[in-house]
Image (tube, rainbow, N blue to C red):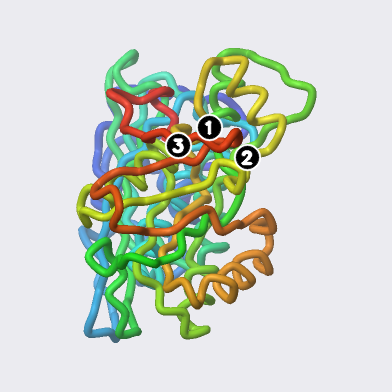
Amino acid sequence: MTTEFNPTCPLPITQHTQVQLAHGSGGKLMHQLIDQIFAHLYEDTRHAPGHDSAVLNVSSDNLAYTTDSYVVNPLIFPGGDIGQLAVNGTVNDLAMAGARAHSLSLGLILEEGLDMPTLWTVCESIRRSADAARIQIVTGDTKVVDRGKGDGIFINTSGIGTIDHPLTIAPSSVRAGDAIIVNGDLARHGMAVMAMREGLEFESAITSDTCPLGDVVMELIDADIEVHCLRDLTRGGLSSALNEIASSTRLSMEIDEARIPVREDVASACELLGLDPLYVANEGRFVAFVPGDQAERALAIMQDHPGFGSANFIGRVTEQHPSLVILKSRIGANRILDLLAGDQLPRIC
């Protein structure tokens, strides 16, 4: 019989619970964690904890595979939390390859002393986010580290997706003349985390843009949009993504500042903190490269998708300035948009 405990009550994690979730062994507390918190993450009984690995049935000749780690501080922020971030981030990495999300692994590193309400909140968010993105959590692992060495929770995920179309969605497919489109307003995630971390209050609430991107990408592909490249605008924001693609293609990205969607309150917050919104991380935004003659149709698909009404065409790919990103400012002057030497905001994803 499973021992009952109330997951809303603080129940400290101790270093004596250092066992692997997949093994399902260890102390009484770890059994409680597995039975009452972690087990409900596994919808399919074939993938329930208690075995060392998952056996998958994937009917596709082309698979995408990705892995990432999440170390955001604070763990819960306006509009999201580390659990939602971990699921959406992995689904979105698969989507950027044009892959439909299939299976997810979940590794949790918990700090000694973590309270149960926080762990429960994060696990509930993981489950809801996986359901929303239609991805199965199929295997996992849990470790506990000494107090002061884990910052509450670290999460590692790996994801598998299927590619069922003939497109090669990669920087190598970008061509001069391609339209550059973003799917919504920028910099909200970074500002939401920064405001929470620093205890800042603005006139209007700034919430993270974290969301899964698989559906809108599949809509573009299913509509026969010849998607050349996709890149999510996470660490380093729009500027870093464009610079990486410009460097690998030796083409120029020419963008218009006036066409880049940034909410007024977010722009004001960035200005107050001395940050450039084009370098601030996002968690539900991506840049798409499509043939110029398909730009209007691609943009319409994005704008019709819930939450992406502010999507906009922001520029074109050219051959004029190889490997450079050129920004036309609001006053009409051009400047090079370069990479930053480091992150403006550390520990935000």
Q: Residue at x 64, y 22 (%)?
A: 269
Of the image marks 3 and 2, the number of the one nearer the N terminus: 2
Question: Crowding at label 2, few (<14), some or many (≥20) Cα neighbours within 10 Å?
Answer: some
Of the image marks 2 and 1, the number of the one nearer the N terminus: 2
Residue 63 appears in the picture as rendered: yes
Q: Residue at x 30, y 46 (%)?
A: 68
| CA gap, disc 2 and disc 1 | 8 Å
The front one of 155 and 10 is: 155
Query: Which residue is tagged 1?
Result: 277
Residue 346 % position (x, y) = 38, 23
Residue 5 appears in the picture as rendered: no
Residue 334, numbered circle: 3
Amino acid type, callout 1: Pro
> Which residue of the protein is positioned furthest toward the right in this rendering?
203
Query: Which residue is tagged 2?
Result: 262
Per the image, label 2 sits on a secondary structure element best described as loop
Of the image marks 1 and 3, the number of the one nearer the N terminus: 1
Amino acid type, callout 2: Val
Residue 138 % position (x, y) = 34, 63
Residue 157 % position (x, y) = 32, 49
- Position of residue 337 relative to residue 272, above or below, is below
Please state which of the two labelled residues, at mark 3 or mark 2, is closer to the viewer: 3
The front one of 206 and 255 is: 255
- Give yes or no for contact between labels 2 and 1 (Cβ–Cβ under 8 Å): yes
Q: Residue at x 47, y 44 (%)?
A: 85
- Position of residue 162 relative to residue 277, above or below, is below
| CA gap, disc 1 and disc 3 | 18 Å
Residue 323, numbered circle: none
